[in-house]
Amino acid sequence: MIKEIEILVEMQKRDDIISEKDILTETLPRELNSLIKNLEEADLVQENTKNDLDENLTAQKLKELDINDNNEHIEKYKNQLLTIKTNKEYKALNSEVSHLETKNSQIDDELIVLMEEETVLRDNLKEAEIKQKYAEEQLKANEEKLKRKIEQVKKDIEEIRKKRNELARNLSRQLVKRYGALIRNKGKKAVVFNIKNACSGCGYTIRPQLIIEIREGNKIVSCENCGRMLVSESKD
């Protein structure tokens, strides 16, 4: 096998590793962003639930104030009933007392609904606090670790790319350009194998004469379909 083919195979091995690590440069940040987003969403749910609970408690206090205010008026009107002399005035005040008592009854019903909602909101708030704490702990436990992994992957890629480029210095500029073009345009696969007399890159059947040339390894053979550089099946 000519030296150029050996070098190209080694370059492809390194580009294969870079491709695998490129996936990590996408998945690791996504994993980190997911943890951050989970915490942000948990914070928001907790805050909204707390606000809903605060609004509920405020509404209850206002209704209690309405009841107290109505009760004061009821008490006032009942005292006035004792001093009223005309039947017309008596009926008017008595009617106002009945109206306020009915109103208080309605407010009591509304208060019961609010108190039931309060119970649900307090349960929801407890659940939201648990989820928020868990999301916070998950981010705290994994954030720095994921950041270190991301940085390490970047360093690994840079180191592997450097070694690949060092190998490329032993090839002609034309061959390096050809290799680079195939890497960019053929799914990061410039060098592929003859596997069962077919191109492992595209599956195209290799002609018998080309199979012989690939086996001999005296020149670089290209797939007639995809243009990738063909070598004998790997023994790894």
Image (cartoon, rainbow, N blue to C red):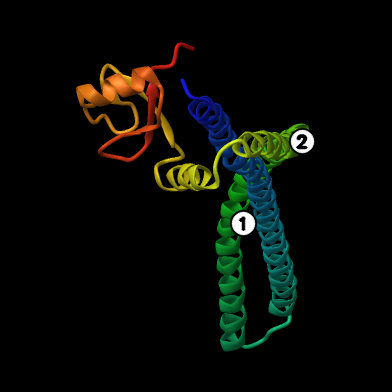
Q: What x and y, as percent, mark residue 198? A: 26, 24
Q: In the depicted view, which residue is nearer to us: 64 or 3?
A: 3
Hey, what amino acid is under mark 2? Arg
Residue 190 visible within the image: yes
Hey, what amino acid is under mark 1? Leu
Residue 2 got which mark? none
Q: What x and y, as percent, mark residue 178? A: 45, 45
Which residue is found at the position 44% from the left and 37% from the top? 190
Few, some or many residues within 10 Å of mark 2 (<14, 14–19, 20+):
few
Circle 2 SS class:
helix
Which residue is found at the position 56% from the left and 77% from the top? 95
> As drawn, is 25 to the left or to the right of 138?
left
Q: Nearer the viewer, mark 1 or mark 2?
A: 2
Rendered view: 116 above or below 203:
below
Q: In the depicted view, which residue is nearer to us: 33 or 228?
A: 228
Q: What x and y, as percent, mark residue 195? A: 32, 19
Cα distance in 3D space between marks 1 and 2: 54 Å
What residue sits right under mark 1 in the picture? 111
What residue sits right under mark 2 in the picture? 148
Q: In the depicted view, which residue is nearer to us: 59 or 217?
A: 217
Few, some or many residues within 10 Å of mark 1 (<14, 14–19, 20+):
some
Q: Quadrant of residue 54?
A: bottom right
> As drawn, is 223 to the left or to the right of 33?
left
Mark 1 vs 2, N-terminal side: 1
Rendered view: 12 above or below 58:
above
Residue 130 visible within the image: no
Which residue is found at the position 67% from the left and 50% from the top? 40
